[in-house]
Amino acid sequence: MDFLETLLQRNAEFAENDFAAELKIIPSQKTMIIGCVDPRVDPMDVLKLAPGEAAVIRNVGGRVNPALLETMAILRTVSKVGGNEVGQGWNLIVLHHTDCGISGCYHHAPELLARHMGVAEEHLAALEIDDPYKAVAVDVAALKANPRLPGGFKVSGLVYDVKTGRIDTVVPAQLLRTE
């Protein structure tokens, strides 16, 4: 059996035993998590999230880049159309991790990474690609500086250690901005 068949069997079991038709499009805990695509750092697992508690947006490095900001704008519009305002009282969590593969891209394909991040190659160093603790603070600062995001978000920055399974709070929860 190939892995696709395995996945289809798992889905059939999910549909039979765990499917929850009552889940809403708006996360029950009014939380958005920005994380990395690395399979070792799935927020559903490392944060023990229940289905429907949070919206999880994942990209390479879990970084704030133009595509992420566009995704967040689309989610905000989808929520408004559904009658829910995203922002006030919501949590916005930036989750980076140790031993991130984005470092390899930084050192071996900086032009590709610069495009992904929406910056000129000479500005990559300022993004602290090699240090997740500094990088998460850079990304929280980028979110705070973005006037298009609702100021009512409580934003925080966390780093997951892939060797211990523990999370450190680097940027404690604070309002994105006071408006």
Image (tube, rainbow, N blue to C red):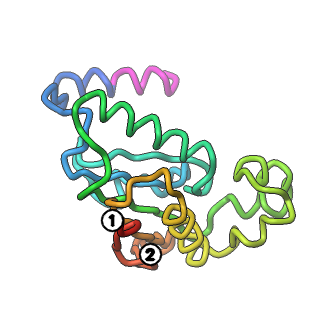
Image position, residue 132 (x, y; %): 59, 72
Q: Is residue 120 above or below residue 70?
A: below
Q: Is residue 77 within the magenta segment?
A: no
User: How far apart, in angstroms, are the residues tagged by discs 1 and 2?
Assistant: 27 Å
Q: Is residue 18 above or below residue 145?
A: above
Q: Is residue 60 above or below residue 145?
A: above
Residue at 47% over, 57% down: 41
Q: Can you name the residue that lies furthest to the front here?
A: 179
Tell me the magenta residue range: 1-9
The residue lying toward the viewer, choosing from 172 and 40, is 172
Image position, residue 10 (x, y; %): 33, 28
The residue tagged with tag 1: helix, strand or loop?
Answer: strand
The residue lying toward the viewer, choosing from 45 and 80, is 80
**Residue kind at label 2, given as amino acid type:** Thr
Looking at the image, residue 176 sits to the left or right of residue 39; the answer is left
Q: Please name the residue that numbered disc 2 is placed on.
A: 164
Foreground disc of the pair 1, 2 = 1
Q: Is residue 3 within the magenta segment?
A: yes
Looking at the image, residue 71 sits to the left or right of residue 77; the answer is right
Residue at 39% over, 33% down: 77
Task: For the C terminus, give its image quadrant.
Answer: bottom left
| Neighbourhood count class around disc 2 (C-alpha, 10 Å): few under 14, some 14–19, many 20 upward | few
Looking at the image, residue 82 sits to the left or right of residue 42; the answer is left
**Residue kind at label 1, given as amino acid type:** Lys
Q: Is residue 61 above or below residue 98?
A: above
Image position, residue 35 (x, y; %): 49, 55
Q: Choose top left, top right, bottom left or bottom right for residue 13.
A: top left
Q: Please name the residue that numbered disc 1 is placed on.
A: 154
